[in-house]
Amino acid sequence: MGKGMLDFCKMIVERVSFNDVLFEKEVKKAFKQLTRDEIREFKAWLRDKFREKTRYEYLFQEDPIMPRRYAM
């Protein structure tokens, strides 16, 4: 899969970033839809783009415990 889904998730998160509830919901939804490598890239993008949203810093961590479906 190309970067289509990653770019789509970024676009959605940017569009809902004005609302904290929607922001968190869409970020979590993106984690379910992206591959492990895409998640790493997505988190780096989140850290750079939304540094001021410290309330959601736990979403931006580099290596949090991945859900079981991502375990190798």
Image: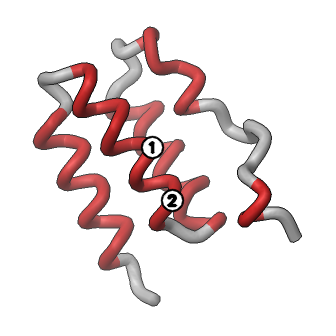
Residue 33 appears at what percent x and percent y? 46, 66
Locate residue 4 relative to residue 46 in the image: left or right: left
Residue at 41%, 33% in the rendered image: 48
Q: CB under 8 Å between callouts 2 and 1?
A: yes
Which residue is tagged 1?
28
- Disc 2 crowd rating (10 Å Cα; few below 14, some 14-19, many 20+) is some
Residue at 30%, 58% in the rendered image: 9
Q: Amino acid at mark 1?
A: Lys
As drawn, 4 above or below 44: below
Closer to the camera in the image, 48 or 43: 43
Q: Amino acid at mark 2?
A: Lys
Badge 2 element: helix
Residue 62 appears at what percent x and percent y? 68, 38
Residue 6 appears at what percent x and percent y? 37, 66
Residue at 13%, 24% in the rendered image: 18
Closer to the camera in the image, 38 or 34: 34
Residue 69 appears at what percent x and percent y? 73, 65
Badge 1 element: helix
Q: Quadrant of the C terminus?
A: bottom right
As drawn, 41 above or below 33: above
Which residue is tagged 2?
32
Closer to the camera in the image, 19 or 3: 19
Quarter of the view holding residue 68: bottom right
Locate residue 13 relative to residue 44 in the image: left or right: left
Quarter of the view holding residue 40: bottom right
Residue at 47%, 52% in the rendered image: 42
